[in-house]
Image: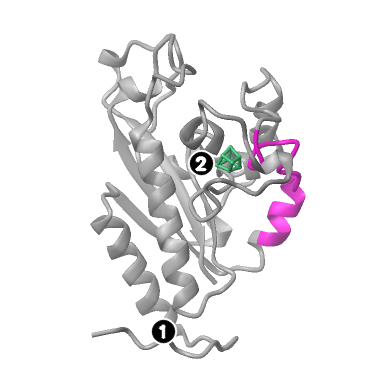
Amino acid sequence: MVKEVAAFSENVSDEKLETDIENYVNLTKELGATDVKKIRTDMIILDERVRARCYSPRCPYYGTNLNCPPHFDWDVEKSREIVSKYKYAVFIMLEVPPEEQTGKDYFSPKHKLPGALKMYEIVAKVQSAAFYDGYPLALGFAGGGSCKRVFCSAVDCKGIKGEGCRMALKSNPTMHGAGMDAYSMASEVGWKIYPLGKTTDPSQIPHGLELGLVLIH
Ligand code: SF4
């Protein structure tokens, strides 16, 4: 049976919001997330230092796409302003093999990031479901790898040439690009997160994490 599309209303009842968010929690699990939490937006940790890490040491994706600075140009203050307009978000976690997030070839296009790709897909699907449920301002943030790394590692970003994003309905800014301290937030909700870098020995780490977030209402 085709689901009836409800007319938009700014006044969403607590009951509807509760039911819809529970549906998004279930949806993320059906799509393969390891865990997901409904969180209040005052649990979103924003910190200028997270964004500073895009600049130093300079991320190889800085300036290469629409979703990383400086093209993604809202600062942490703007993120605070935006986040404060929402009451609830879903915070999504996917455990991935540590090998996916380590190794000297990490930045090579040949090193695939299936977990990051999956997180982009989950975030986009939750954002879309919320849109059709009457939350047109639902806003998604994907996880670790930038969209350039995940979708366009072998081609130039069309977005910064003014030709439109190749993956407009799938790509989002990352949590860290918006200044969200995803590591601390994961730890706060009880998810184990480990420092993973190019030189990490993956055999010493139980898992890597991909994290994503959708502001709902
Ligand atoms: S075209 Fe590719 S790199 Fe550019 S914003 Fe879109 S997904 Fe990101």
Q: Which mark is residue 45?
A: none
Q: For residue 71: magenta?
A: yes
Q: Earlier in the sequence, mark 1 or mark 2?
A: 1
Q: Is residue 52 magenta?
A: no
The magenta region covers 65-82
Q: Is residue 153 above or below residue 140?
A: above
Which residue is painted at 67% across and 35% down in the image?
51
Q: Is residue 132 visible?
A: yes
* Residue 16 position within the rendered picture, expressed as x and y whole percent measured from the top left: 41, 84
Q: Is residue 105 depicted above or below 27 in this figure?
A: above
Q: In this view of the protein, which residue sits in the foreground, 64 or 184?
A: 64
From what the image shows, is residue 127 above or below residue 118? Answer: below
Q: Residue at x 44, y 46 (%)?
A: 120
x 37%, y 35%: residue: 209
Q: Which disc is residue 182 wearing?
A: 2
Ligand 1 rendered quadrant:
top right
User: Which residue type does callout 1 highlight?
Assistant: Lys
Q: Position of residue 185 (x, y in %)?
A: 49, 45
From the viewer's perspective, tell me whether residue 105 is left or right of residue 42: left
Q: Residue at coordinates 26% horizontally, 50% vertically from top-left?
A: 32
Image quadrant assignment for residue 114: top left
Task: Indicate the position of residue 121 as horizontal and vertical percent values.
Answer: 40, 50
For label 2, being within 8 Å of ligand 1 is answered no
Q: Residue furthest front?
A: 163
What secondary structure characterizes most of the magenta part?
Answer: loop
Residue 214: % across, % down:
49, 58
- Dot 1 falls on a residue whose secondary structure is helix
Residue receiving disc 1: 16
The C terminus appears in which quarter of the rendering?
bottom right
Q: Quadrant of the N terminus?
A: bottom left
Other residues around mark 2 within 10 Å, as few (<14) / some (14–19) / many (≥20)? many
